[in-house]
């Protein structure tokens, strides 16, 4: 199964050599000579592929506005040469310096619905973020005409969950609170979201148009939204009953943390200007979220000293970790919200609460010490460590003080099992089937709620717990070496 999944991960989405039919593509090298164009190019530009290939862009189009000054994208609308109408141009410079020129028919867009999403100067409460997010979905629905708009948030292991949904009254069913496995959106597709402002698939059933060239390899379509759609994803959308799809990335600190994902059961092309307007709303929301996340971290960090003050005083008073243990250990359980703690110091094992028994502890010790990580964590020991014997402790987060392997102090925070029920949008195990005579995995056919009862896991270790353990480590370092 793992091997079959990795085949999916290797699909070269940017080298399909084809585009979707709702626009045309011209591709030029860094010197401005046209190396590729889509077979439908004449329909918008009025010049046949044969007359374009090998020509300098300027010879065909006169002056073309190009991305300059380190900006690798430019967008504009211009009157068409041969036609009376206008065309939208989107020009991107690829990482190797080539240019892709995507050209779309221009549709006038009525932007009167585009109300400013209420952005508080600095959201400080979760309800403000939730409110902004819900308004964003409602606005995107109005502006694009898409019938189902979801906020699809990435969770642990790159799985994702629909945490908010806005639907037109004609839409049946809901994906709200359902989880989807990471393999539904391969890493390559997720990477493309970091590089592009949106992905529009106006008609998932449409046939792709070939990109032509004189013996050149397939062009790099990383920055082309016209890029043809993966056959696997076409099946996926069809199985979901989706005809048109449009998604905008929510990026915070360079990380893809969510998608605003839009579905329609009919073909839907959103005018370019409207796409830009939606993208601007999504990126303003991303900034707001980023400010909120930073604010939360700052509050946590600023509060660390006062939170740890009692322990600092205790360690100062008693002078040693061992002498402070009786008071220190219950404090750790309460403040770090864990089930138990083990400290190995000076060849002594100190325990409190629910902890790993000796045989389990020695397996964890071996893995942790070999890892050479400062903070090491597992949330399902019985799965993640081979030869681990079943224990009441399901998860551990560890840290070390000192570099000498023999004498270093180790701290293990222990967490008991927490049985979870996860509601998936269909069975996340993908069906294995033959494609063109070869065995491969397929998108699932049913997206109906499918409950997984997850045993053997503790609650996941988050950034907050990591930060608290680091602070504890800092204080203990003072007594161990102070
Ligand atoms: C792409 N899969 C995607 C995308 C989304 C999803 C959002 C981005 C493209 C788009 O916006 O349509 C998944 N869409 C979802 C999920 C929800 C949703 C989870 O609305 C939840 C509500 N997919 C499979 C399998 C493979 C696969 C088995 O199920 C591979 C073997 C691949 N998904 C796949 C590929 C893409 C993709 C290749 C990129 C499609 C493209 O950009 O051309």
Image (spheres, rainbow, N blue to C red):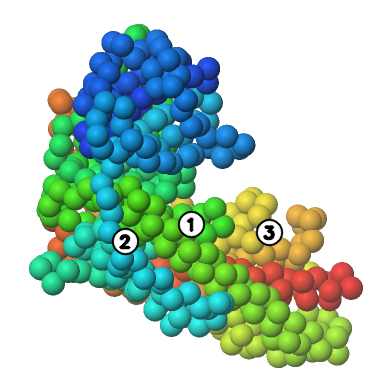
Q: Horizontal and vertical percent for residue 475?
A: 78, 76
Q: What residue sits 50% from the left and 83% below the top?
A: 125
Q: Earlier in the sequence, mark 2 or mark 1?
A: 2
| Visible residue check, residue 355 | no
Task: Identify the residue shown where x is 35% and y is 33%.
Answer: 102
- Distance, label 2 to label 1, CA atoms, is 25 Å
List the residue tagged with mark 2: 111
For the residues labelled 2 and 3, the Cα–Cα distance comes to 52 Å
Q: On the rendered structure, is 141 left or right of 389? A: left
Please name whichever residue, 160 or 310, is drawn nearer the observer in this view of the structure: 160
Which quadrant would the N terminus be assigned to in this image? top left
Q: Does the Cβ of the disc 2 residue fall within 8 Å of ligand 1? A: no
Q: Quadrant of residue 113?
A: bottom left
Q: Mark 3 — residue?
A: 374
Whether residue 399 is visible, yes or no, is: yes
Q: Is mark 1 within 8 Å of ligand 1?
A: no
SS at badge 1: strand
What residue is shown with label 1? 251
- Looking at the picture, how far across and down is residue 376, in whole percent? 60, 60
Residue, far right: 482
- What is the quadrant of residue 46 in the picture? top left
Q: Is residue 293 placed above or below 235 in the rendered structure?
A: below
Tell me residue 467's x, y (percent): 64, 71
In percent of the image, x 68 and y 59: which residue is there?
Answer: 374
* Residue 312 drawn above or below residue 101: below
């Amino acid at each position: 199964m793992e091997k079959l999944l990795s085949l999916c991960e290797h699909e070269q989405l940017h080298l399909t050599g084809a585009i979707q039919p709702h626009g045309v593509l011209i591709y030029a090298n860094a010197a401005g000579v046209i190396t590729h164009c889509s077979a439908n190019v004449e329909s918008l530009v009025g010049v046949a592929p044969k007359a374009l290939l090998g020509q300098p862009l300027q010879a065909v189009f006169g002056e073309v506005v190009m991305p300059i000054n380190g900006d690798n994208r430019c967008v504009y609308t211009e009157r068409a040469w041969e036609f009376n109408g206008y065309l939208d141009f989107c020009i991107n410079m690829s990482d190797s310096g080539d240019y892709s020129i995507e050209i779309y028919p221009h549709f006038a867009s009525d932007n009167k619905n585009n109300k400013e999403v209420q952005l508080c100067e600095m959201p400080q409460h979760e309800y403000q973020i939730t409110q902004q997010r819900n308004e964003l979905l409602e606005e995107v629905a109005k502006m694009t005409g898409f019938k189902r708009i979801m906020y699809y948030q990435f969770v642990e292991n790159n799985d994702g969950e629909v945490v908010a949904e806005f639907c037109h009254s004609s839409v049946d069913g809901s994906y709200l609170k359902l989880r989807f496995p990471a393999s539904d959106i391969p890493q390559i597709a997720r990477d493309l979201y970091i590089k592009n402002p949106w992905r529009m698939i106006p008609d998932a059933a449409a046939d792709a148009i070939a990109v032509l060239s004189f013996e050149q390899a397939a062009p790099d379509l990383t920055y082309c939204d016209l890029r043809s759609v993966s056959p696997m994803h076409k099946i996926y959308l069809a199985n979901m009953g989706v005809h048109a799809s449009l998604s905008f990335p929510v990026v915070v600190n360079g990380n893809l943390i969510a998608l605003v994902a839009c579905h329609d059961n009919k073909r839907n092309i959103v005018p370019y200007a409207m796409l830009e307007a939606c993208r601007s709303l999504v990126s303003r929301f991303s900034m707001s979220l980023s400010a909120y996340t930073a604010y939360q971290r700052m509050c946590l960090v600023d509060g660390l000293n006062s939170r740890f003050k009692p322990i600092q005083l205790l360690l100062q008073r008693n002078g040693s970790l061992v002498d402070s243990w009786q008071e220190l250990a219950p404090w750790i359980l309460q403040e770090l919200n864990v089930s138990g703690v083990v400290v190995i110091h000076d060849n002594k094992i100190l325990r409190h609460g629910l902890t790993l028994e000796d045989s389990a502890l020695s397996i964890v010790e071996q893995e942790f010490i070999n890892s050479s990580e400062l903070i090491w964590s597992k949330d399902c020991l019985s799965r993640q460590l081979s030869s681990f014997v079943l224990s009441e402790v399901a998860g551990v987060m560890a840290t070390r003080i000192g570099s000498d392997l023999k004498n270093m102090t180790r701290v293990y925070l222990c967490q008991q099992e927490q049985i979870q029920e996860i509601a998936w949008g269909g069975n996340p195990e993908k069906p294995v089937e033959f494609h063109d005579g070869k065995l491969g995995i397929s998108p699932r056919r049913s997206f109906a709620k499918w409950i997984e009862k997850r045993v053997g896991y503790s609650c996941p270790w988050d950034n907050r717990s990591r930060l608290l353990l680091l602070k504890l480590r800092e204080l203990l370092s003072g007594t161990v070496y102070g």
